[in-house]
Image: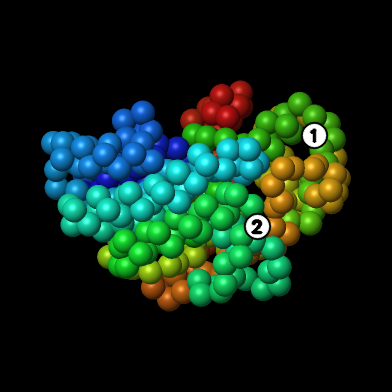
Amino acid sequence: MKLWIIGHGLLGTALKKLCDNKSIKTVITTRDVVDITHLEQLKKFSQTPAAEGVTHIINCAAYTNVDQAEKEPELAHRVNALGPENIGNVANKIQAKVVHISTDYVFGEGGKRPFKELDTCNPVGVYGKTKWEGEVNLLDICPLACIIRSSWLFGRGGKNFISSLVQRMKSDPMLHIVNDQKGRPTFVQDLAEAILSLLCHGGIYHFSNAGEVSRYEMAQKIHAAIKTLQIPIACTTLIPVSSDTFPTLAKRPSYSVLCTEKITSVLGTPPRHWEEALKEYLRDCLRIKLLSNFGFF
């Protein structure tokens, strides 16, 4: 088995490290080496010695700037919609299995219960629409591909909601946090483990850590965890506010909780609670002496 990991961001980095720890052969490519919007680049790399013996292509690459996508819809479409189709074409040529990472944003607004895999997708913004198109395009090319939808990713080595929030807590005595957006956070280490567990599976799966929570409630837990770990911060007060307080180009769904019953039945155990994952994340950062000066943000 050999994995071709496309994308060297938060998830791609975590997956590569996990594979190294498990002695799984990998090759990882960045956009500078292989741009998934260019089919010929993918084909050319697939024929190089570095890609020899690849059995799985894991697509962690995406255009993820939700607001900027509203300004650059064509670019977002090329990366999120055309990119997976190109990957599927190359995977068919080299007889490799595809695992593609997608998002809760494919569902859009209107959720009142956790979204299941077969629920109707109705994305409202460019980001969500292009990610959904990518799913459809990939499955048209590779019907046996595995698509994993996730949400609210966090982890060491890149910018995310938690890292940005801790950075703000370092200097701001008072923070206003949105309280009308609810979802399920996902620790990239846990998602990487799930990806490896689904290498032989096809279809659509949802994965995120257990526990639906609002952004404000999440901030409260983060603040408490930081205090428990005795990490110095300036923030003493968190104030809940509505999304209207912080206007954005792209509308965020007020409820985008993913149901993980399907993947639980496959893995045999439910995802751990996000608070447990959060503590591991913060302790790991503290252990390597990076969190104290916020050098990893």
Q: List x then y, in percent, for residue 239.
A: 86, 45
The amino acid type found where label 1 is placed reads Cys
Side (left or right) of 184 relative to 174: left
The amino acid type found where label 2 is placed reads Val
Closer to the camera, 187 or 199? 199
Of the residues tagged 1 and 2, which is closer to the observer? 2
| Residue bearing the label numbered 2 | 124
Q: List x then y, in percent, for residue 99.
A: 35, 56
Label 2, residues with CA under 10 Å away: few <14, some 14-19, many ≥20: some
- Farthest front residue in view: 74
Quarter of the image with the C terminus in it: top right
Count of marks overlaid on the render: 2
Quadrant of residue 196 within the rendered picture: bottom left
Give the numbered dot on residue 235.
1
Residue positioned 66% across, 35% down in the render: 164
Residue positioned 82% across, 38% down in the render: 175
Residue positioned 83% across, 31% down in the render: 173
Mark pair 1, 2: CA separation: 35 Å
Side (left or right) of 90 relative to 242: left
Q: List x then y, in percent, for residue 262.
A: 46, 74
SS assignment at label 1: loop
Give the numbered dot on residue 261.
none
Q: List x then y, in percent, for residue 76.
A: 52, 43
Residue positioned 48% across, 57% down in the render: 133
The colour scheme applied to this rendered structure is rainbow
User: Would you place residue 223 above or below residue 287 in this image?
Assistant: below
